Amino acid sequence: MHIGIDVGGTNTDAVLMDDTRTLAAVKHATTPDVTTGIVQAIGDLRAGHHFDGSEITAVMIGTTHFINALVQAKRLAPTAALRLGLPATQALPPLVDWPAELVEAISARSYLAHGGYEFDGRPISPLDPEELRAHAADMRANGIRSVAISSVFSPVNHDLEVEAARIVAEELGPDVAISLSHEIGRIGLLERENATIINAALRELASEIVDGLTAAVRKQGIEAPIFLSQNDGTLMDEEYVRLYPVATFASGPTNSMRGAAMTSGLDTCAVVDIGGTTSDVGLLINGFPRETSNEVKVAGIRTNFRMPDVLSIGIGGGSIVNLETAEVGPESVGYRLMTEALVFGGSTLTATDVAVAAGRADIGDASKVAHLDPEFVERVLSRIADRVAEAVDRMRTSPEPIPVVAVGGGSVLLSDELPLFGSVHRPENFAVANAIGASIAQVGGEIDKVYAIEPGRREAAIAEVRAEAVDKAIAAGASPGSVSIVDFDEIPIPYLPGNATRIRVKAVGDLDMAVVR
Amino acid sequence: MSWKLTAADLSDLARGATLLGTGGGGDPYIGKMLVEQVLGTGSITILDPDDLADDLFVIPTAQMGAPTVMIEKIPAGFEATLALRTLEDHLGRKADATMPIECGGINSMIPLLVAAETGLPVVDGDGMGRAFPELSMETFAVYGVHGSPLALAGERGERVIIDTGDDDRQMEWLARGITIRLGGVGHIAEYAMSGADVKRTAVPRTISMALALGRAIRLAREAHSSPFEAIAETLSTTLYSHVRELFVGKVADVERRTTDGFAKGRAVILPLDPSSDDRFEIAFQNENLIAHHNGDVVAIVPDLICVVDHETAEPITTEGLRYGQRVRVLGISTPAMMRTQAALQAFGPTAFGLTEPFMPVEGETAAAEAALEFAATARGVGVAEEAHA
C-alpha cells in the first residue's frame, strides 16, 4: 500500500492506494502549518481503511509550498547569482529582469565572471579562479547563504559550472548551498539562470519543509520513503527536493491530470478539469502532460520551467449564462454560487442552474429552474460542448482521434457526447484525482542539448542522447527494465554549421523501491 | 519629421517588427532588453528620410548569425557600436546617424542600441523592408549602394574589415564564415551611404510603421476591437497599403528541416470547418516565402506573408508554428521599389529557387502601375543608370 497526498492552496487531499486501486480517500482544508494537515489526513485515511505503518511502502506528496513562498516573497534565503561568460553577456547581467521587490526579498547579489562555452563547445574564455575567489569573498561579506551558478551554453558543456562550484564551495564552506543551472533549466541563458536563482533562494525552505513532512509522516508510524511530485509528474526523493525545490512548482495541475488519466485507465487523452470559473484543458501523452514550449512567467520572472500546457476557457459551474444569446461565461459568480444561483434561491442564471434544469445534476431546488425553456437549456449545453471541444481540438497535436476525460465538480456541465471527440470518460474518485496523481510511482531523466550532427551520424547521435536519458532515469531510481522514452523533440537551428540541432529527450520508468530503500 | 523614441515604445516596436519579420528575423526580446538597459529614461532621435541632408553620413548597423545563439550567449553590449566605430576608422569619417538594414525581427533593435550608446540619431527606414536571410538582399544593393566595406565585431573586441568591392554576395559569404568562428553571432556595420543615397535606396519609414503596427494591435486588443482592422488601417497610409486576409484556419501540419544552414519547411493550414476541402500551404526558408490556396499562388516573396493568432493578431514565427493553432494568414503588399526587376532578382522568387513568378498580393494591375510609376520617377531612372555605370 502507498499514500498519495496533494497539498493545495485550498484543500489537502489524500488517498490510500493498493497499486492502482483507491482504498480510502479524504479531503481537508489546508492548514497554515503543513505538518498538522498531513497528520490529520493520514489519520483520517487510517480511520477509513485500517493499516499498519509498516504496511505502507511509500508516501508521495504534491505541494504548492515552494511556488507560494516565491509568489509571497517569504522565507527566501539571501542569494547570489554568479554567471560565467565574460566578456560576453555583460549587457544583461543576472537578475536584470527581476521585479525589484523579489531582488530585495532574496537580498540578491549579482556577479559576472570569465568562462562559458560557444554553441559548439569551444570555450569563450578560461575560468579565472582568483576572480571567483574574490566574488566568493564578497558573497561572504554580504551574508549570502545560497549561490546560483550559470554558464553560457552549460547545456552543451557543464564542466565550468562544476569547477566554479568547487572553487566557490572552498571559499564559502559547506553551509552555503550551490545550485547549478545545467541541472535545472534548458537552453536560454536568462530563463535558465532565473530558474536556478529561484531554486537557490528556496534551498533553506526546502530543508525545513522536507524535515517537517518527514516528521509528520514518521509520527504516524510510517517509516517508508517519502517522495515529492515534480512538474512533469515524476517523483523525486527527499534528498533531491533539498537540492531542487524548484522542480515542484507546477505539480498541482500535473497531478490532477495524471490522476484523471489513471482512474480512467487512459494514458494518452485530453483532460478537461471543470471548476467553478474555468475549464482547464490539458493533454496527456503516454501518461505525462504535454508541456509548454514557451517561456513561463512565475511571480513576474521569465523562466523556462517545464510547465504543463493548460488552456483555460471561461466556463465553470458558476459561469453566468446570458438568457438571450445562451452564451456562457466568462463572468462567474465564483464562490457566491451557493447564494446567487437560481437553484439556491439567488437571482443569477448560472451554468449550474442549466445543468440542474437538464437533469444532469441534482443540487439545490430544481423547481426554481423548471421555467427554463428545454430548447434554451439544450442550446446552452451544446454551446458548452462546442467550446470545450474546440479547446480540446486546439490542444491536440495531431488530427488523430483522442479520448476526452472530464473531472472536477463542474464536469456535470459537459454532455456525454462531444463534437469531434465522441463520448466523454468520467472516472470514479475524480474529486481526489490530484492525490491519486501524486501517488503514481514513476521517475524520469531528461536531456536537452545542442548537438552538431555530422553527416550520416544523425541516427547514432540520437541513439546516444536517448541512452543518456535512460541512464539518467535509472540513476533517479527507475528499475532499468521499465524505462522508456516518453518524449522526443529535434529542432534544427538555422545559420549554424554542421546541422546544429537541439535535441530533447525524456525517459521515464517505474520507481524501483528496492533500490530506493 | 523627426521624432523621439523612448523605452515605453519598445514593446510595441518589437511586436510590429515580429510581424514584419514575416515568420523569421529572430525574436526581438533580447534586443529590446539590450536597448532598455542602455536607454533607461532617455530617448532616441528618429530621423525622417525626407529630412536628411544629402551629405549626411549614415552607417547602418545590425547583427548577423543565429538568433538562437543570442538567447544563450547574450552580447557584451558594445559589439555593434564597435563595428560602427571600426568602419568609421577605416573610412576616416564619423557617422552622423545609423539605420537598420532589416526592419523585421531582432535587427529592428540593434541600431537603437547603437543610438542609445552613442547618442547618434537613427534613420527611419531600412534596406529589406521586412526580414531576409542574407546581407546581400538589400534595396541598398539593388539601387547601387554596396555593402563593402563591412566591419564585423565580436564580444572579445575582435574587429574585422571585409571589402569585396561590388560583390555583396561574396561579402555575405565571408562575413557568415567569420560569424561562425565568433560563435554564431557577429555584429556588423555596412552599407555606409550618404543622405542622398538613403533617400534613393532605403525603404522609408519602416521603424515608425513597425511601431504603429505594434501599437495599433495592442490598442485594438485593449479596446476589444478588431486588431485586423487596426492593421489594415495602419498600413493604408504607408507604402505597404494593401493587406489581404489570405486564409483563416488551423495549423494541420508543420514540416521542418535544416538545409545549408537554413530552416526550411512548410506548414499546412486547413479550414476551421472540417467539411470544407480548402487547403492552404506556406513554404518557408527562415521567413515565409510562398503561399498556395488550393494549389494557386496567392502570395509570394518579397510580399509579406504573415501568420498571426486568429484572435489577438499576435505574430507567429515559423519556429513558433504548432499543430492546432488557430491562425489568420495576412498577405501584405510591399513598396514598388521592392518589386522592380532588379529588386526581384535580388530577393524575389528566383533568389530562393522558386519557379513561380512574382505576383503581387493585391493583383496584377495595381502593382504593375505602381512599379512603372516608380521606374518613371527621376530617382528611379537615376538608379537604373547608376547601376549600369
Image: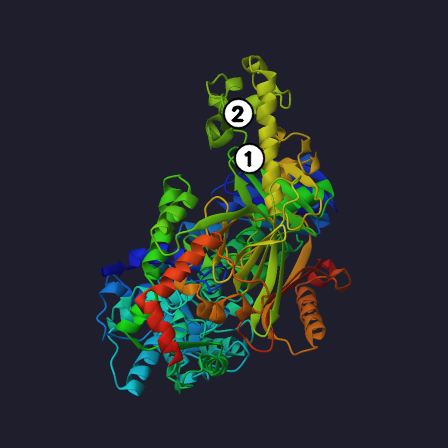
Q: Is residue B161 above or below residue A429?
A: below
Quadrant position of the C terminus of chain A in the picture: bottom right
Secondary structure beneath dot 1 equals loop
* Mark positioned earlier in the residue sequence (2 or 1): 1
User: What amino acid type should be assigned to the residue bearing mark 1?
Assistant: Gly
Of A336 and B259, the residue lying toward us: B259
The disc label shown at residue A326, or none: 2
Q: Is residue A31 visible?
A: yes
* In-image side of B118 versus B273 (left or right): left
Which chain does tag 2 point to?
A
**Residue at 58% across / 66% down in the picture?**
B354
Q: Which residue is mark 1?
A: A275
Q: Are marks 2 and 1 on the same chain?
A: yes
Counting from the top left corner in percent of width and height, residue B242 is at 42, 51
Counting from the top left corner in percent of width and height, residue A120 is at 55, 78
Labels 2, 1: front one: 2
Which chain does tag 1 point to?
A
Q: Is residue A178 visible?
A: no
Coloring basis for residues: rainbow
Of B62 and A81, the residue lying toward us: B62
